[in-house]
Amino acid sequence: TAKTVEMMASQVNDIVGREESQETLIDIFNELGGETVVPWLISPSRKFISRVNVLMHEAPYTSEAKLHVMFICNDLVLLGKSKELSGFGGTGTGKKNRASSLKRVFTSSLKGSVRGSVRSSAGRKSTHKSGTRTLGKITVKLVKTMELKSITPRLLSEKDAQDCSGIELKYVERTFEPATKSASGKQVTKIGKLRIWLPTEPEQADVYTKIEEALEALRERENSQKKAEVEHGGRQRARRNWKSGRHGSGVASGTGSLRAAGHRTARR
């Protein structure tokens, strides 16, 4: 039937999408330095969502925003500095020229990144082989890794000096302080903030929507997992109660039989 064909087509599209996502993650894995830098990046449950070039600076926002590449996954957001874009916006560049350069960089990057999956650059062969993790040449230096579930995004109504539209990301950052002679090691948790800037309001809305949709999907997965754990625990308790009830009945029945047999023997 048409419904069956539609269901099969949807399943095939899901499989193809997962394969493309894993291929893209392997490309990013190689760009960031492979096993040496990001050995944890490749995961069966991790899915690539988007890649976009942004201007980024951290609170208290006193320093100038620098060009970064941002990778959005279904559970992580990564920020790095791309060597290919490192020459953009030198300190001596005037605001007007810098703004026009920014527009050109964004326009060229957004065509194949924020609206679609990442692929190897034109004329460059992908460094990975199917089923393997090859150490690639580092082309993007990783500068920040954020857990998606710790992020709270906020659209900024004001624009920056280059007339770019922004998003503020509030996130939880966890670091581990190593042990010293006078103190043991401990985990330190702090709240961080950063702002990313995009050239137009549509690009701002697009990136914001992708982050919000990924957060919503993550919350749904966590709620489903909690619900499944509760249901599983209930079934386990019911099974234990049933077994203990059956065992108790058996003991009581056996005891009653022994008493009855003893009573009959005494009468004889």
Image (cartoon, helix red, strand yellow):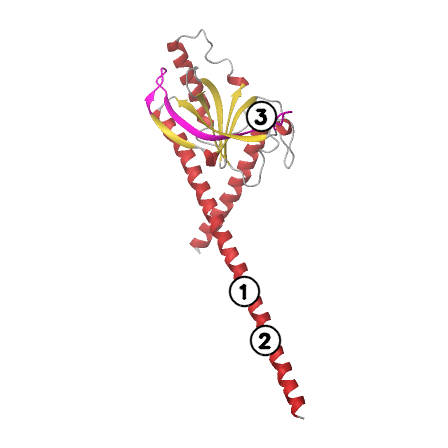
Q: Is 248 one of the magenta-colored residues?
A: no
Q: Kindly identify which residue carries mark 2.
A: 252
Instruction: Residue type at mark 3: give it.
Output: Glu
Query: For the view shown, which residue lies furthest in the bottom direction?
Result: 268
Which of label 2 and label 3 is nearer to you?
2
Q: CA distance from mark 1 to mark 3?
A: 55 Å
Q: Quadrant of the C terminus?
A: bottom right
Relative vertical location of residue 241 with respect to residue 176 in this rendering, above or below: below
User: Residue type at mark 1?
Assistant: Asn
Report crowding for label 2: few under 14, some 14 to 19, many 20 or more residues within 10 A (C-alpha): few
The local secondary structure at tag 1 comes to helix
Q: Say which amino acid is labelled 2.
A: Ala
Question: Can you name the residue that lies furthest to the front here?
Answer: 266
Read off the magenta span: 157-183
Check the picture and name the quadrant holding the N terminus.
bottom left
Residue 85: give x, y in percent of width and height.
50, 17
**Would residue 89 be found to the left or right of residue 34 on screen?**
left
Q: Please give the label number shown on residue 241.
A: 1
Quadrant for residue 40, please give it.
top right
Nearest to the observer: residue 191 or residue 156: 191
Q: Choose mark 1 or mark 2, whichever is in front.
A: 2
Judging depth in this view, the residue of 241 and 18 nearest the camera is: 241
Dividing the picture into quadrants, the one containing residue 41 is top right
The circle drawn on residue 172 is none
Q: Compute the Cα span from label 1 to label 2.
A: 16 Å
Q: Classify 57 as above or below 38.
A: above
Q: Residue at x 52, y 56 (%)?
A: 233
